[in-house]
Image (cartoon, rainbow, N blue to C red):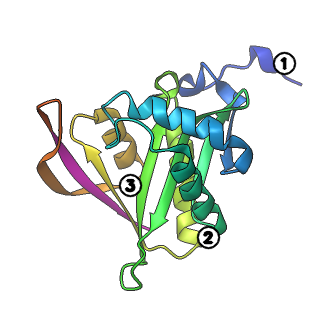
């Protein structure tokens, strides 16, 4: 038997290894998720929001995901949410074959395979529930996220110049999609 403490972990998981759990969204993690969402939003770089919306609104969105069995997963480390992913189907019956991706990770967990594991879990769930395509918008300056999405099979299908304006600075957006 091999001693786990001496096993060499893959380099992309060297800091956290198997201590991170990918879990379907649960009520017990809502407050932790909310704090993580707010931290990522306040980075002003990756999400459209600059701070989390009121807790009640975020909790209702998360509960709606769960009650509909839509893809929504948390990355859990030491009992706290350190990342998330969700795929929300379009509400129109003519568009409900499409899902829209949202995700984020705390800075110290980026670039270590956590996002990949989250995303693959959500994509598998989306396919099993009958979604045919997943779409996302990503800021053109977010090279690590673009690389992750391409690694998971997404392709670029559009570009929006001046998509967002924050503090008199414009951000361009790449539109990506993946057929499941």
Circle 3 residue = 153
Circle 2 residue = 68
Q: CA distance from mark 1 to mark 2?
A: 42 Å
Would residue 114 be found to the left or right of residue 16 on screen? left
Which of the pair 82/20 is nearer the observer? 82
Main SS class of the magenta portion in the image: strand
Report the quarter where the N terminus lies.
Answer: top right
- Vertical placement of residue 29 versus 93, above or below: above
Mark 1 and mark 2 in contact? Answer it, CB < 8 Å: no
Would residue 153 be found to the left or right of residue 169 on screen? right
Would residue 74 be found to the left or right of residue 2 on screen? left
User: What residue do we see at 17% from left, 29% from top?
Assistant: 167
- Vertical placement of residue 113 versus 54, above or below: above
Circle 1 residue = 3
- Vertical placement of residue 34 versus 65, above or below: above
State which quadrant residue 52 falls in. top left
Q: CA distance from mark 2 to mark 3?
A: 26 Å
Pick out the residue farthest to the right.
Answer: 1
The mark lying in front, picked from 2 and 3, is 2
Segment tinted magenta in the rendering? 171-180
Report the quarter where the C terminus lies.
Answer: bottom left
Pick out the residue farthest to the top.
Answer: 6
Please tell me which of labels 2 and 3 falls first in the chain: 2
Disc 2 is placed on an element classified as loop
Would residue 108 be found to the left or right of residue 42 on screen? right
106 within the magenta span: no
Disc 1 is placed on an element classified as loop
User: What residue do we see at 65% from left, 67% from top?
Assistant: 67
Disc 3 is placed on an element classified as loop
Q: CA distance from mark 3 to mark 1?
A: 36 Å
User: What residue do we see at 71% from left, 28% from top?
Assistant: 19
């Amino acid at each position: 038997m091999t001693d786990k403490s001496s096993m060499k972990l893959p380099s992309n998981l060297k800091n956290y290894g198997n201590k991170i759990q990918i879990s379907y969204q649960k009520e017990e993690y809502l407050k932790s998720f909310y704090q993580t969402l707010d931290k990522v939003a306040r980075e002003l770089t990756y999400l459209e929001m600059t701070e989390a919306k009121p807790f009640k609104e975020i909790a209702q969105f998360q509960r709606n995901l769960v009650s509909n069995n839509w893809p929504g997963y948390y990355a859990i480390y030491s009992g706290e949410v350190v990342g998330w992913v969700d795929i929300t189907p379009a509400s129109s019956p003519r568009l409900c074959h499409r899902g829209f991706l949202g995700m984020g990770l705390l800075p110290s967990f980026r670039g270590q395979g956590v996002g990949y594991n989250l995303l693959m879990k959500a994509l598998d769930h989306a396919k099993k529930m009958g979604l045919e395509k997943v779409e996302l918008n990503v800021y053109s300056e977010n090279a690590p996220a673009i690389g992750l999405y391409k690694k998971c099979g997404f392709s670029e299908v559009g570009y929006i110049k001046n998509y967002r304006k924050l503090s008199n600075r414009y951000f361009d957006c790449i539109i990506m999609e993946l057929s499941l």
